[in-house]
Image (tube, rainbow, N blue to C red):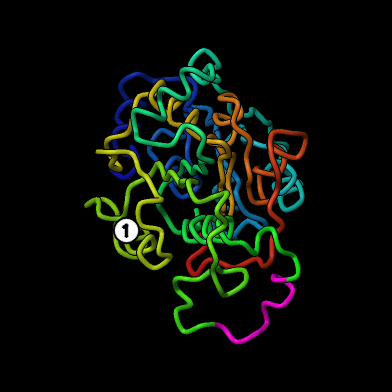
Amino acid sequence: GPWGAKSVERLIHTWKPDVLFTLGDPWMVDWAAKIEGRDRVRWVMYVPIDRDPISRAWIDVLSRPDCLVLYSDWGAEVVRRQMPYRTPLVIPHGVDTTVFHPFTPEKRMAARRMLGIDEHAFVVGQIARNQDRKQVPLTIGAFKAFNCMCAADEERVAGSARPLPPNLAYSCPVCGDFEQDPEKASSMLYLHMTMGDDSDDGRGVSWNIHELVRRYDLGGRVLGTPGYTVRKGVASRDLNAIYNLFDVHVLTTKREGYGLSVIESMASGIPNVVTAYSACRELVEKGGGELIDVLAYVNEPHDE
C-alpha cells in the first residue's frame, strides 16, 4: 500500500505492538488513522510543519495521533496557534559530527583538485532535491548576479530600471545587464541534486538544470555529482566531502519542515544563506549564516 499502509496493518495484527511510530508529512501517513486495529495502539506522529497556515486537510490528520511530535519550534508555534487543543512536543533533528565535520585545509584542497576545481575558487553549493519547492532557478540566478560587476556597484544597481537588453535570459537578474567581475571569474556553483533527466524526475516537478545553465550562460561554471539519481544517493562521508568543497551553502527554498542540509553544512564548517521562513529561520538566526528576506509569499495550487 502507499507509504506502508498495508504492511503496517499486517504488522499490527501479527506483532500486536503497543505503539505505532510514523515519520513523514501528514499526507504520507494519513492512512494511520484509518487502518484496522488503530484503536489497539498508541500512535506517535513525528511530523514536519513547513507552512503557515496549515490547510484544513492537514489539521484533520494532525488531530488524530495520540502524541504529536514536531521537528521545530516554529512548527510547534504554528500548530499551537491553529490547534490550541493540541500540545505538541518538539524533537529537533540532529547530525552525526563524527561523519559531518570540517576538512583540514590540505584535505579540502585535495578534494577540489580531484574535481578540477581551482583551489582558490569561491564555490557556492546547494544540496537539495531538485523540485519546485527548492527554487533552483533562484540559486542559479543569484550565482549569475554574484558574478556581475553590479554586485560591487550600488550606483549601477540603483539605475537598473533602464530598458533591458534583448538577451535578458543571459543577463544578470539584478541589473539586467552583465559584466563579469574578474575577481570572481573562477567561482563555481555545485548542485548536489539530479539534473532533471532522471526517470524519477517527472516533468513539472524537477528543473532541467542543463537548460537553466544554458539560459544563464554559465557553461563550465556549474558542477553536479556524477551518477547521482533519486534512488541512488551517496554515502554520508562522501556527502561530507561535498560540503567541504563549498565556501557557502545556499538554500533558496520556499519552506522547510527542518532543513537537514543546513545543519549538516554547519557541522562541516560551511556557512549558509537560507530563506527567512519556516524552520530555516531558527536554524540560522543565532549564527551559522545569513537569512534571505522574503519578497512574496505564494499559495501552492494543490496545498494539502
Camera-side residue: 121 or 79? 121
Q: Is any atom of residue 34 visible in this view?
A: no
Q: Relative to 154, is 213 on the left or the right?
A: left
Q: Residue at x 58, y 39 (%)?
A: 248
Q: Is any atom of residue 77 visible in this view?
A: yes
Of helix, strand and loop, which one carries label 1?
A: helix
Camera-side residue: 243 or 20? 243
Picture coordinates of residue 249, whole percent (x, y) = 56, 40
Residue 273 forms part of the magenta stretch? no
Camera-side residue: 178 or 26? 178
| Amino acid bearing label 1 | His
- Looking at the image, the residue that sits furthest to the top is 98
**Res 86 quadrant in image:** top right
**Magenta part mainly helix, strand or loop?**
loop
Q: Where 9 sits versus 104, above or below?
A: below
Q: Which residue is mark 1?
A: 210
Label 1 neighbour load within 10 Å: few <14, some 14-19, many 20+: some
Q: Which residues are magenta?
A: 156-164
Q: Relative to 257, is 196 on the left or the right?
A: left
Q: Where 113 sits versus 149, above or below?
A: above
Q: Residue at x 60, y 87 (%)?
A: 163
Q: Quarter of the image containing the N terminus?
A: top left
Picture coordinates of residue 75, whole percent (x, y) = 67, 43
Picture coordinates of residue 115, whole percent (x, y) = 34, 33
